[in-house]
Amino acid sequence: MASDIKHIGILTSGGDAPGMNAAVFAVAKTANNHGIKLSGIRKGFEGLIDNDLLPLDPNEMQRLMHQGGTILKTARSERFMSAQGQNKALRTIEQNKLDAIIAIGGDGTFRGMLALSKISNIPFIGIPGTIDNDIAGTDYTLGFDSAVNTAVKCIDNIRDTAESHNRVFLVEVMGRDSGYIGIHSGLSCGADAILVPESNEDINYLLHKIKHYNSEDAFIVVMCEGDELNVEQVSSKIRKVNAHIDLRIAKLGHIQRGGKPSAQDRMLGIRLGVLATKAIINGESGKMAGVCNNKPTLRPIKSVMKKQSVDAETQDLLTLFCG
Amino acid sequence: MASDIKHIGILTSGGDAPGMNAAVFAVAKTANNHGIKLSGIRKGFEGLIDNDLLPLDPNEMQRLMHQGGTILKTARSERFMSAQGQNKALRTIEQNKLDAIIAIGGDGTFRGMLALSKISNIPFIGIPGTIDNDIAGTDYTLGFDSAVNTAVKCIDNIRDTAESHNRVFLVEVMGRDSGYIGIHSGLSCGADAILVPESNEDINYLLHKIKHYNSEDAFIVVMCEGDELNVEQVSSKIRKVNAHIDLRIAKLGHIQRGGKPSAQDRMLGIRLGVLATKAIINGESGKMAGVCNNKPTLRPIKSVMKKQSVDAETQDLLTLFCG
Amino acid sequence: MASDIKHIGILTSGGDAPGMNAAVFAVAKTANNHGIKLSGIRKGFEGLIDNDLLPLDPNEMQRLMHQGGTILKTARSERFMSAQGQNKALRTIEQNKLDAIIAIGGDGTFRGMLALSKISNIPFIGIPGTIDNDIAGTDYTLGFDSAVNTAVKCIDNIRDTAESHNRVFLVEVMGRDSGYIGIHSGLSCGADAILVPESNEDINYLLHKIKHYNSEDAFIVVMCEGDELNVEQVSSKIRKVNAHIDLRIAKLGHIQRGGKPSAQDRMLGIRLGVLATKAIINGESGKMAGVCNNKPTLRPIKSVMKKQSVDAETQDLLTLFCG
Amino acid sequence: MASDIKHIGILTSGGDAPGMNAAVFAVAKTANNHGIKLSGIRKGFEGLIDNDLLPLDPNEMQRLMHQGGTILKTARSERFMSAQGQNKALRTIEQNKLDAIIAIGGDGTFRGMLALSKISNIPFIGIPGTIDNDIAGTDYTLGFDSAVNTAVKCIDNIRDTAESHNRVFLVEVMGRDSGYIGIHSGLSCGADAILVPESNEDINYLLHKIKHYNSEDAFIVVMCEGDELNVEQVSSKIRKVNAHIDLRIAKLGHIQRGGKPSAQDRMLGIRLGVLATKAIINGESGKMAGVCNNKPTLRPIKSVMKKQSVDAETQDLLTLFCG
């Protein structure tokens, strides 16, 4: 079965995430060990449309694991939404005799691959690469641990200045509709309150607590960008219940995307890259390579196309510390 | 059942590990929520012998989570090996009316608690705190992720100078008899070879590979302090098969113990601290609070008093990348 | 002369800056070596009004040098603007028999000390502590190097994601009316354009360059918070000349204030703390301890109460790289 | 005069140092602005012998400033010691029509350039690139600030574990015969004693202080690799005066060479790269581009070929804090 696969293409699509390069390296290494050629497809589906491929040598990539971002570049491709774009992509696959594709990205990336699989029978495996940790079927997505560590370093910094001034800080972290980055970074930094998209009640806890805040210490609120309320609205509500506080806002923004990947994300990239490549060799397709209960796991792509909800243990921690 | 527990003592013992303070904070917070008093026992079993306790207030400890080391201080206690020392410890327990003890440390710490449990029926729960990841019954020990991240940063630095000079570097990492720090940091940094205590063959792979090394790039060897051969012996063997190389040695040493805990270790400390405290409240004793397959899990202490062996997936990765 | 000084008070006021704790430690050590008692005044002038003092022992502070923020806490005091507040401050000075005050902060802090010196003849020395590097009479202010290093790490992170997407990033850094943080961090990160308050022409350079930007690479603009235009205005101008670009905004904000001080800021804190204490002992007053042309230098406070302009060499570099 | 220079060669030689890439970028940018071609000579004098040159485009290098090490690679060339090697180097210069050379490195590099200048009249300018800060004629050498910051982070880490165990740590830092890295990192970390090559008395201070050490806190000794005594000898002397202490050794080693350059080193690289290129354009030769009293300064190479001694202010600080 493995003998069928002679040439794999790999792409990264959607938002970049630290650890993507480790995954690409692991795919290159595994493919190379099996005598399979690997080509990088640049800029996600854009490169598939434009026939923009480059050969990948594992010996050249060993040193790139510590780089943030993705050396393959990434993009969100509007052209790939159209039949015309998808047909061009098919031509690239045929011209380069690609026998399989490994696609690293989030739900948009997987939707793209599912669309492609409707007009082609090329095998593909997905790898969950997004800092948001919002994909079901895996304990963690690639980039999540790095993003949390970056957020934690930033909030530690903010605590320094907050304690010096006895200030309240409202820190917005990334995560789209998911509260994971907010919960992990907030708990890790000893936040006084955490606002997540998954709860409508947390604002009441915050307002109750801040009402009794005596300005004799730092008070750190971590809130997720996907919360029902935005930073300005929360800020306004806080001021209403406690007019005397010294309140500042910090939106961490895109610095959470970049930087050297954490050790966990490099290991996760390696684990998922190896798992995905072996899956391709074993004739699998239409699945996502993830880690479930800390074990490498293949799940049908369709089953993971829903948001990862906050697990019960994490929810309990959130309630215990900030609820 | 919970009503029996009014006062918990907590200690850290053996080598310090990043994340211990997060665990202590989580115990303080959980105990406080249940109206239970918490006292820190300073310097591990030494403080138990010397009645050296301090009250712990969760509101004071929130800000200490980002600190490396242990604010309770730690020690290896010879006095506690004797009946006399243990009897003094008992007296401290009685005088302070401690109803339970939570002990954070490695196998030595757990042996100490088992010894104490033979002369006393005070309930206790262990939390695995050691950078070495060498305790069975948990996916990871507290401090492991931080130590790996520190090692990774160091090896990234070493790669910079190794590539500038086309040099071979032999980097020794910690881990006592365990290869985990070596494997995780080595794979994460794209090491060319990794020497672990768990294998006698890896040296042959290294020597074969270095024989053909052409000095046109960096060549990074990560070796564990617990390997059969020491750094000087490996260095000598390398020089024998390839006399022309420019070889340097770097022992990372104690810097791997310190530093701000990683986000994962803070979260792990919180998870295990909460689990241990709830176990105490629920009347459990003689167990270790760990995370198995990424789920909070209590295991009998006696069942974890053996070295964590390298799991099959990690062993496969090691073989694939450096075998 | 030195024999007159038996008790020094020290305060930090205005915005906190990394390195302030090193300066306090150095003052404590130097005072201690001369048999002089040192008291910390908490929350800047607020503590002087409220008689909120704490004794400082150099042996306790040795370990605090690596902490960001200020262990003395800081504040902007409105009460100290009034005669009543200043009179209360005088009473604190008399009650505690303070023979001199060392004040760490920016121009507001120095203005406060000048006000106090009008109603009292207590000797005082200022130390320039602000991340903005906007005080004349010193090559660098305390905290500037740390803030620049933090900004540099953030912009390095942003480059990772910017290169992955071929995006334009508009990064706002701190510095109030000064361009120093922007220039140093921008040059250090290879920014494509830097917008500073000191120039009205830099926007033209940016617009000219971005007009010809082909979206085949990252494009990083660093802009200072004190620039004539705000981030939204610059963003709007950019879009007008090149509608096709993918533009993102990142305001680094308060994370630039916190974090462990850099080695340079710790050394600068030590140098200025020693210089200030020796000046007090030598009977000096009304001066600022700075470093000019890399030499410890005392300058009359009144002569430094003006903005540090961008020096000619830095201006030339700015023109060469982004002008 | 500038019109004579059409093609500059640049090399890095000796030990690599963070900031070298910033200097190369600044030379590339400045040369490019003057219409001058720049070629990188790989592996120092080895590349000059072997005609191993590569073209340098400033637009490609902008993103490399944050990399540690040197993208030109470096080496210590034995062949260049011989007349044969130097003649081959001359041929490379002629074949490529190099009009000038900029050489980044330490005293060995400068000796190499002086040797070359005896058999050729090609203009050259040196840039002091070494982490050791042991070159006269400049306040700081390129790489020093980064190395100190790395050492400081390591010693901060060590303090965490030292305080947890109340241990004595003997930390060896780099610097060859110079005490600068030891003094700056030791003072910045609140070391209890610092041993430098420049003093024979410091060991007595250390032994006196450690004799009275009561094991109730951390005790950090920073010692320079070039000290009269080596780590083992110091360790042995310490144990003789205080047998009860818990002493550990940490040699920081090559991690001090690598890593992302600090902001100061990037700025210094830019400043010196611009100064050196302008000097070449202005017809200068045989000089080193440095920063004296924080001002860009050209000094005859021969006048800087002596060790930078510890300046009086730094010596005073050392005496005050550890003397």
Image: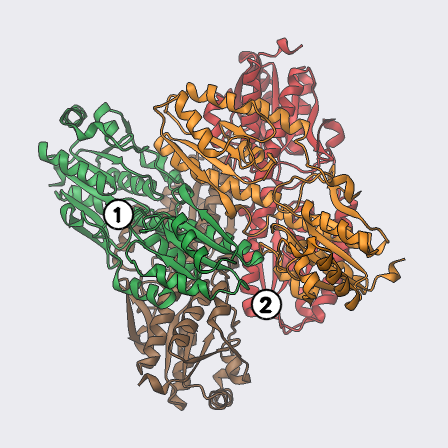
Chain colours: A red, B orange, C brown, D green
Identify the secondary structure beneath mark 1.
Answer: helix
Identify the secondary structure beneath mark 2.
Answer: loop
Quarter occupied by residue A91: top right
Q: Could you say which is closer to the camera, residue A156 or residue D322?
A: D322
Position of C36 relative to C264 (above/below): below
Question: Along the horizontal axis of the image, is B67 left or right of B297?
Answer: left
Q: Amino acid at mark 2?
A: Arg
Percent coordinates x, y for residue B322 in the rendering: 54, 24
Q: Which mark is residue A167?
A: 2
Q: Residues within 10 Å of mark 2 (few under 14, many from 20)?
A: many
Question: Along the horizontal axis of the image, is A289 left or right of A10?
Answer: right
In three-dimensional space, the C-alpha distance between marks 2 and 1, rounded to whole angstroms, equals 42 Å
The residue under the point 54% across, 51% down is B259
Q: Which mark is residue D272?
A: 1
Chain of residue at mark 2:
A
Q: Could you say which is closer to the camera, residue C217 or residue B20?
A: B20
Q: Amino acid at mark 1?
A: Leu
Percent coordinates x, y for residue C35 in the rendering: 40, 80
Q: Residues within 10 Å of mark 1 (few under 14, many from 20)?
A: many
Percent coordinates x, y for residue B196 in the rendering: 57, 31
Q: Quadrant of the N terminus of chain A?
A: top right
Q: Quadrant of the C terminus of chain A?
A: bottom right
Chain of residue at mark 1:
D
The residue under the point 41% across, 20% down is B241
Q: Could you say which is closer to the camera, residue C33 or residue C187?
A: C33
Question: Along the horizontal axis of the image, is A209 left or right of D76?
Answer: right
